[in-house]
Image (spheres, helix red, strand yellow):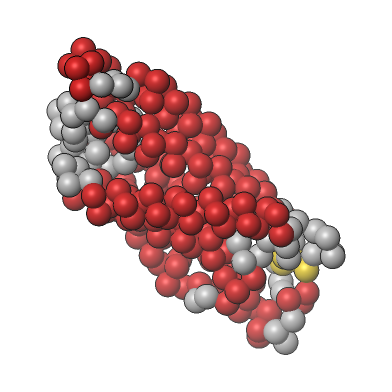
Amino acid sequence: MIAATGLRWILTLLFCALAAHGLWRALTARSHPWTARLAHALHAVMALAMFAMAWSWGMDLPGTPQVVFFSVAAAWFLLAALAVPNGPGPRARALVDALPHAVMTGAMAWMAAAMSSAMSMGATGGGHAHDMPGMDMSAPGATATMTLDDTADRWSAVLLALVLLAFALWWLAKGFDTGRLAPRTASGAASSSAGAGSAASNGAGPGSAGADSTRPGSAVHAAWDLGCHGLMALGMAVMFIVMV
């Protein structure tokens, strides 16, 4: 749905890289609990869905399965934080850490529902994109091929973009701090693993808090995870902005 070629390819490369990282972490993070590996896999699926939405053919994909999948995923992030034991920390903290992930997947469900509704109404009304209720065909040279027309939907998209941008800045800042504090050698791991492991546990997803924080390099993995979450939220925020 992005008409600007440069932006479309930048987001395509970004989401493909994030999907590859998520799949790699889901398959190789053996020391993490299954909830953390599933969280990585869900982030990979989100990245692939965002990659598809950046292209016009992505609007032809069935919308209802996407809405159901991402709605269930959003609920899972919250339920996993409450129901699955995640170390000695309080469940309230686990819920706070899981909330941004739930918001991201919920935003994916909202975007899929908005696009699916526009496509189905357009097909009922004659199948022309410029006749779609709630959607406008953009003029040549615009950033997006179609934008939201309904005022409530536009304000919802703006709100979601701002929330995602805040998450992106928060995750990226924590990722930089975690990477900066990460031990560079195995000999230095013992002296700094406590602080780095504590920083790495925040925002990494359900079930991942300190799963292998005592191992050299675990804080580096956590820093990459936090950075990827931040880049995912940033890419999603851009997609919501171009819809407005």
Q: Nearer the viewer, residue 176 or 63?
A: 176
For the N terminus, the quadrant is: bottom right
Residue at the spot 22% in from the left edge and 27% down from the top edge: 216
Q: For the view shown, which residue lies furthest in the top direction?
A: 191
Q: Is residue 96 visible?
A: no
Q: Is residue 55 visible?
A: yes
Q: For the view shown, which residue lies furthest in the right direction?
A: 140
> Does residue 219 appear left or right of residue 116 in this picture?
left
Residue at the spot 72% in from the left edge and 87% down from the top edge: 126
In percent of width and height, residue 125 lies at 71, 84
In percent of width and height, residue 4 lies at 73, 58
In percent of width and height, residue 67 lies at 45, 66
> Does residue 238 appear left or right of residue 222 in this picture?
right
Indicate whether 103 appears above or below 57. Answer: above
Residue 31, by quadrant, is top left
Indicate whether 22 appears above or below 52. Answer: above
Residue 180, by quadrant, is top left
> Does residue 171 appear left or right of residue 236 in this picture?
left
Residue at the spot 65% in from the left edge and 58% down from the top edge: 8
Q: Nearer the viewer, residue 19 or 161?
A: 19
Residue at the spot 38% in from the left edge and 65% down from the top edge: 69
In percent of width and height, residue 131 lies at 76, 77
